Image (cartoon, rainbow, N blue to C red):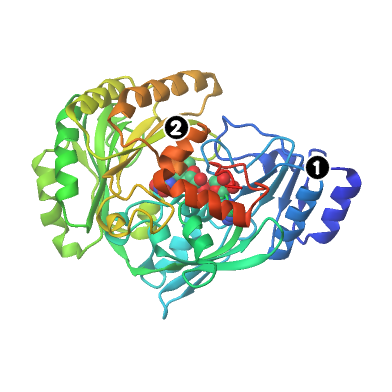
Amino acid sequence: MTTVETTELRSRMSGQVVTPDDAGYDDARAIYNAMIDRRPAVIARCRSVADVQAALDAGRRAGLPIAVRGGGHNGPGFGSVDDGLVVDLSPMNEVVVDPGARTVRVQGGATWGAVDAATHEHGLATPSGIISTTGVGGLTLGGGHGYLSRKYGLTIDNLLEAQVVLADGRVVTASESEHPDLFWALRGGGGNFGVVTSLRFRLHPVTNVVAGPTVWPVDATADVLRWYRDFLPAQHEDLYGFFAVMTIPPGDPFPEPLHLQKACGVVWCYAGDPADADAALAPVRELQPQWEGIGSVPYPGLQAGFDALYPKGLQWYWRGDFVREVPDEAVAAHVRFAQELPSTHSTMHLYPVDGAVRRVGQSDTAWSYRDVTFSQVIVGVDPDPANAAAITRWTSDYWEATHPYSAGGAYVNFMMDEGQDRVRATYQGNYDRLAEVKANYDPDNTFRINQNIHPAR
Ligand SMILES: Cc1cc2nc3c(=O)[nH]c(=O)nc-3n(C[C@H](O)[C@H](O)[C@H](O)COP(=O)(O)OP(=O)(O)OC[C@H]3O[C@@H](n4cnc5c(N)ncnc54)[C@H](O)[C@@H]3O)c2cc1C
């Protein structure tokens, strides 16, 4: 972008325009995953829909690749782009709750912590992920699963409408009644169709939940995982628990003798009547965990429980898969890689995506894997860039060992930049319809810094 074009964009925007010559450039370009180090030509920090329109127009006229950033948490770093223009939505973070209608309207750059805090004041919540610093935009457009998903579905199953700035600058509302094809595609199709400037979600009565981890020594991984794979799917949807192989963090609330021990565990969330939680968790306690940290906690507290362990700026490499069943051969692979965890932060999670998630049909939204039991993610994480190769190798080897037992595709929000075959495998029979919607709403593929869907025409 020329100096004249940048000056013109500055004059059109109420938000800041940051270029490599500006003092705040390094802060402005930093994203959550420090393994990704991109140098955009322009970062447009949008404060309004009009700012988004101005930034898109300037980027398109200058012929720059355009990335859209919500919370900046994306693994492969699709919230940024080398030598291109970043539409940074982080200043657009307003959250407005309508307690009477049990809905919340959220601007496209907000994080889940802000949503949970605002809705909790009214004893309400909607399903999202397990870290409160994650962006509402990216998590929702990819699908969104977390502690409330067995009971209330994916995040997209609670999306009522979205306001979208299209590549040509038009502003449209997508819902079941307006632009229904776009609304269908937004629910799982990622950031392929436009800049989502606001989203409205359905809320549910959720105040305190009974939640927390149970841990066992790493030697028990085979027994606990075999028990978990059979136990959890058979339970009432009020009970949620994700399985993890992990290293016990060296701090509260974990007892000191366990610090830095390799382990397996399950993080539970009981979202039914708290009086029934002990009965629901009794079979877990029969398995005699080495330690448990389960208690009554305000829902936003649970959501923020891992924030301090995973601050911005760590090295991340991750791979995902959808999983129908966990056969004994896969259990053996999990045991092997649990014993070889390469760093304290590295982990593997199996997130339940059954229950209410399955009550929506395979082609009702773009998110096609409605028949699986778990969404698996393997993350190699470490603060030290010198360990980047080691965590990447462990993650890749682990994925190679378990992928043969998977359903084929992966949750788009748990994928690296793995190419078109992987994107197609993830959308299965929904891909062709997504490509048609893409051709109608973004025929030039302006929004291509993502798990890209190619326009059908
Ligand atoms: C520590 C951690 C824990 C996580 N846990 C979970 C979890 O429990 N459940 C879960 O479902 N996911 C989880 N995720 C994955 C998360 O959903 C993805 O990383 C997601 O991409 C993050 O969204 P973002 O807005 O923060 O990211 P960004 O990097 O800003 O954006 C990600 C993608 O979405 C697009 N995008 C973002 N906002 C918009 C918008 N408003 N309009 C158009 N396009 C947009 C971007 O262009 C980009 O392609 C986790 C991620 C991390 C890092």
Residue 401's place in the image compared with 234, above or below, is above
| Residue 137 % position (x, y) | 53, 54
Quadrant hosting residue 393: top left
- Looking at the image, is mark 1 or mark 2 earlier in the sequence? 1
Q: Dot 2: within a 10 Å radius of its alpha carbon, few (fewer than 14), some, or many (20 or more) residues?
A: many
Q: Residue furthest bottom?
A: 100
User: Which amino acid does the dot numbered 2 rest on?
Assistant: Trp
Q: Dot 1: within a 10 Å radius of its alpha carbon, few (fewer than 14), some, or many (20 or more) residues?
A: few
| Residue 457 % position (x, y) | 61, 47
Disc 2 marks which residue? 318
Please state if 405 lies on the left or on the right of 129 as rendered. Answer: left
Mark yes or no: residue 185 visible.
Answer: yes
Disc 1 marks which residue? 22
Q: Which residue is located at x 45 percent, y 32 percent? A: 318
| Residue 268 % position (x, y) | 25, 48
| Residue 409 % position (x, y) | 38, 38
Mark yes or no: residue 308 visible.
Answer: no
